[in-house]
Image (cartoon, rainbow, N blue to C red):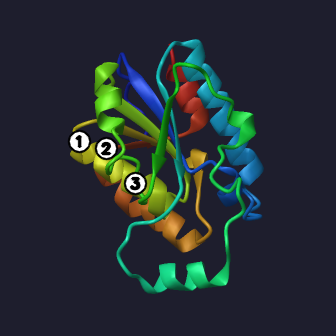
Amino acid sequence: MPLTTLDTVPALVLVDLQKGILASGHPGVPTLLDKAVTLAHAFREHALPVALVNVTGGAPGRTDAAHARRAARERPHDWAELAPDLGTHPDDILITKRTWGAFHDTGLDERLRARGVTQLVIGGVATSMGVESTARAAHEHGYHVVLPTDLMLDPDQASHEHSIGHIFPKLGETTTTAELLRNLH
């Protein structure tokens, strides 16, 4: 479904575009980062909010996957640093999360509402985890959700396709970065 409209005050939310995650070697990273930089610049140029979200840990509950990951490696000191190409602007909202989604226990909702935001454009890594969890919470918080499907990637292609094809149409409108840029005014 194409984007119907951009609200008066949309915000761009970029999830987990940070050194440690982007260093995964996924072939889509350079294109994703280029699109994220382009959109962040466009939102800033229009004096619209940009939220840059990184992750520093995980939820405390036990899972098979989390245990295996912790045992397999230690993270370098700069793992959680945002991708330098994104840059930051003094008006950006910087959020550090410890769960998949950007809303839980971060103050993101309050900071967006204080700026009059009613619509969120969400992208990042991984489609089926950080992006989907953030989109679900945004929908539950009453935001209009826009999901540019070329502004996200997932190390698991089947999970990526499932989120885009089955979950996102229930949470908001899917679109492309190019279509967003045409509608941004």
User: Residue tagged by mark 3?
Assistant: 101
Quarter of the rendering containing residue 145 = top left
In the rendered image, residue 106, in percent from the top left (x then y), is placed at: 36, 44
User: Residue tagged by mark 2?
Assistant: 138
* Residue 100 sits above or below residue 184 on the image: below
Q: Residue at x 37, y 19 (%)?
A: 9
The label on residue 141 is: 1
Mark 2 vs mark 1, CA separation in Å: 5 Å
Towards the viewer: 168 or 11: 11
The answer to whether residue 142 is left or right of residue 3 is left
* Residue 133 sits above or below residue 123 on the image: below
Mark 3 vs mark 2, CA separation in Å: 9 Å
Which amino acid is tagged 1?
A: His
Quarter of the rendering containing residue 112 = top left
Which amino acid is tagged 2?
A: Ala
Which amino acid is tagged 3?
A: Gly
Task: Answer whether residue 164 is visible to the viewer in this image.
Answer: no
Quarter of the rendering containing residue 147 = top left
**Which is more N-terminal, label 3 or label 1?**
3
Contact flag, marks 2 and 1 (Cβ < 8 Å):
yes
The answer to whether residue 115 is left or right of residue 29 is left
